[in-house]
Image (cartoon, grey):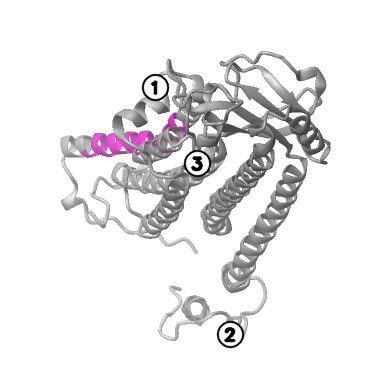
Amino acid sequence: MNSQQQPPTTASRLEPDVLERLNQDIQREIGRLQRLSNRGLWALSLFLLVCLLAWRGFPFLPPPDRVVAALGKPPSPQVISIALLIYIFSAIILSLSRMTMAMEHRSSFCHVGYLTGFFLFYHFAKALDDNYWAVIGAGITILGVESYRIWTYCNEAIAKKREDLEYIRTTGHLPPEN
Amino acid sequence: MFKTLAGRALVPVGLAVTGFVVVCCLLLYSAIRSGVNRYAVTEATNLADTILKSARYAMLKSDRETLATIIHNIGQQKGVEHVRIFNKKGVVNVSAKPDELNRQLDKRAEGCIACHSGPVPTTTLGTMEQARTFRNSSGTQVLAITAPIYNEPECFNAACHVHPASQKVLGTLDIGLAQDSLASSLAIIRTQMIIFTLMTLVLTIGGVTALLRRSVFLPMRRLREFVERLDQGKGPLPDKPPHLPLDLEKIAWSHFRLVQKLHKPEPNRTSPE
């Protein structure tokens, strides 16, 4: 059964210049959403770059002993691991909650920062070799879920905007919810 | 895959659960390995202390024959890869392997550098700093402990000895223990954890999939088939919608009543002719 929504009467049609401006706004919004949908992948790429640097032992940083002498003793690897576990749990719950509520939230790049922090703490505690794959696993999981959330949100929003655009082009009126 | 309801429901759950379980297992394995290694180092350090205490009297009396016999016998023990005593200059004085005797050791070598990194050598090290691991020439993974032999009042006060009281360290004991059994135990733990992780993942993902399929996807498919059958209008109208969960049943009934109304002939409508 195909039920088509009847447009309002021709008396309430929008002016051509308003329609054009509305068209451009929606096109701009679609472009913004398309750029936003790739945000997760960019964050994942940046994280993989950080992983590569961590794999090589952060060659541009001073040796851990010198940093420890300057800043003091780092937390023990066990404490860092507990913090990593709490972090991954919280991040997944937060991401799934945002997915449930269909929220637009750009949080991918801050996760790269947190994960780099974990790499650095393990590096300065001289426990990076033992925990390298755990941080990679945490990063891929969190950034994977976040990428999926942003990507699905953007795809849904783009589809909705395209429907609005089509409605405006065919009827010359604002979509019903606007 | 991502456009279907099943894909949208299962991909984030599968990704989150798989990632979390894998990270938990990696962290747990890392903690177990670290604990086992710490225990092995403590045991090896205790063994080094026991050897030093056993050989103390022979060293005090400068009885080289007894000292060499003690070290040789310890070196015969299964799992002991090497035992040797260096003097202050880094020359091997006593060893379980005769070909190592009188060999000079480089102070920059692994195991020495921990104390000899600065201009003044460190005289005390923590338990973990005394340990080093490496693969020896026969390919065995070895955990080695370097234990300092301190100058004690009995040493510098003894009539036969010439060590001044200011000399803190007289030499070092170096003992290497094979890590094969430890490595095989860790490999068993790793295999068990991989199996446990896979079983947990299969159960979790399988359980969620089964529940979603039973409670959501199958009723949705039955609703879709029912609506499609009504829309195609092939054959007589069914008596009632299929039995579905409450929310979906309301939709089915609503659509069913609408189709019934459309199929009912209107009494007031008259033919245009």
Q: Amino acid at mark 2?
A: Lys
Q: Which chain letter matches label 3?
A: A
Residues at marks 3 and 2, CA–CA distance in whole angstroms:
56 Å
For the C terminus of chain B, give its image quadrant.
Answer: bottom left
Q: Is residue A172 magenta?
A: no
The magenta segment is A22-47
Under circle 2, the secondary element is loop
For discs 2 and 1, the disc positioned in front in the rendered view: 1
Label 1 residue SS? loop
Q: CA distance from mark 3 to mark 1?
A: 19 Å
Residue A61: mark: 1
Q: Nearer the viewer, residue B253 or A114?
A: A114
Mark number for residue B240? 2
Marks 3, 2 in one chain: no
Q: Which residue is mark 3?
A: A135
Residue at 65% over, 55% down: B197
